[in-house]
């Protein structure tokens, strides 16, 4: 091959690379609703190479940016990323890397770097709070050419070992049943000894991200504090008295979430409350910070069916804060 054709080919590949970087693809978050959230990523993402992920939130009716999103649990937008065979998980935010600027707060346009470790299909769920309630949007991301999700057998397990830490999940009174509230507890040990030095991580002793095995029914919850328990009892009382006003419930939850952070559970046990919406196997990512070191335990929970529980939309979300 002569010198000139070779130079032309090199130039063509350079231009293609520039187009990929300068013209990112934009993915619209699901489900639809009063807010539109987009995710801008490179046209092609390669495993092991750092990329910039940019989210932007607008009002669906006006197209205007959602100004001054509320800060809850120390962040404006929480992003949960998992590979859909559940071999990888991250909980990540813009503020982990840079202080928010005024123009970013006014435009609700936030960015952060991320490196997808292996090829495959990933899902990102972004959570934000506005108008006295939290909202979530789902994004599907393909990493690598012709990426596919490898089969990964999810075997039920209540024990997770991360380095020298062991997390053990137990159920307070019953096995999980779809649609039925359940209290759980995670016992945390370091070098086989119970920990007593848990620190707050993003305003809570624990952050728990939950997906069903097929990537549906995302949920995000935290440690089950006495304040949260009192709120749930109040909600149950209102339901019995037919005073189940959705706006009142949302206001109550927001007031609770807006309270100053307080360390209540130092270890070794952290209680968790949840309602699994449908039967199936669920993956629980349990984040905590013993002695200030962030670790993530993974548990696989089998949820039994319950008579009279109707199916919900496959892209619906279920959150308890």
Image: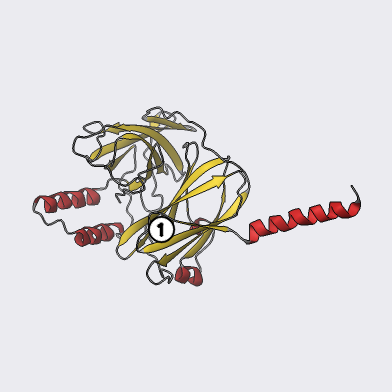
Q: Which residue is drawn at 39% across and 47% down?
A: 199
The colour scheme used to paint the residues is secondary structure
Q: Can residue 260 be seen in this view?
A: no
Q: Which residue is drawn at 13% across and 51% down?
A: 239
Kind of element beneath mark 1: loop
Q: In which quarter of the image is residue 37?
A: bottom left
Residue 196 locus on image (x, y percent): 36, 39
Number of marks in the rendered image = 1
Residue 244 locus on image (x, y percent): 15, 56
Q: Is residue 197 left or right of residue 320?
A: right
Q: Which residue is outermost to the left? A: 241
Q: Is residue 41 left or right of residue 227?
A: right
Q: Residue at x 46, y 66 (%)?
A: 108
Front-most of residues 211 and 228: 211
Residue 27 locus on image (x, y percent): 50, 56
The residue that mark 1 highlights is 74
**Mark 1 neighbour density, 10 Å: few (under 14) some (14–19) many (20 or more):** some
Q: Is residue 259 left or right of residue 298?
A: left
Q: Is residue 246 left or right of residue 129?
A: left
Residue 150 locus on image (x, y percent): 52, 33
Q: Can residue 284 be seen in this view?
A: yes
Q: Is residue 74 above or below residue 155?
A: below
Q: Quadrant of residue 144?
A: top right
């Amino acid at each position: 091959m002569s010198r000139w054709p070779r130079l032309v080919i090199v130039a063509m590949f350079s231009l293609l690379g520039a187009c990929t970087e300068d013209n990112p693809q934009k993915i619209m978050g699901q489900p639809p609703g009063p807010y539109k959230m987009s995710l801008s990523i490179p046209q092609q993402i390669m495993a092991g190479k750092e990329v910039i992920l940019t989210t932007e939130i607008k009002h669906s009716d006006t197209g205007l940016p959602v100004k001054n999103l509320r800060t809850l649990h120390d962040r404006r937008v929480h992003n949960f990323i998992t590979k859909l065979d559940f071999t990888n998980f991250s909980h990540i935010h813009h503020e982990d890397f840079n202080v928010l600027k005024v123009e970013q707060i006014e435009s609700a346009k936030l960015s952060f770097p991320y490196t997808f470790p292996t090829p495959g299909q990933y899902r990102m769920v972004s959570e934000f709070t506005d108008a006295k309630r939290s909202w979530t949007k789902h994004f599907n991301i393909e990493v690598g050419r012709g990426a596919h999700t490898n089969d990964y057998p999810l075997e039920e397990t209540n024990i997770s070992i991360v380095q020298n830490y062991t997390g053990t999940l137990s159920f307070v009174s019953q096995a999980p049943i779809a649609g039925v509230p359940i209290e759980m507890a995670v016992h945390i040990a370091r070098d086989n000894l119970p920990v007593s030095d848990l620190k707050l991580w993003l305003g809570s002793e624990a952050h728990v991200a939950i997906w069903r095995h097929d990537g549906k029914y995302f949920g995000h919850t935290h440690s089950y504090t006495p304040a949260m328990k009192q709120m749930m009892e109040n909600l149950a009382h209102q339901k019995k008295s037919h005073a189940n006003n959705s706006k009142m419930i949302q206001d109550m939850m927001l007031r609770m979430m807006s309270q100053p952070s307080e360390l209540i559970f130092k270890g070794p046990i952290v209680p968790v409350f949840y309602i699994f919406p449908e039967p199936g196997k669920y993956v629980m990512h349990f984040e905590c910070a013993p002695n200030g070191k962030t670790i993530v335990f993974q548990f696989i929970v089998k949820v039994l069916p319950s008579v009279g529980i109707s199916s919900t939309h496959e892209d619906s979300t279920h959150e308890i804060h």
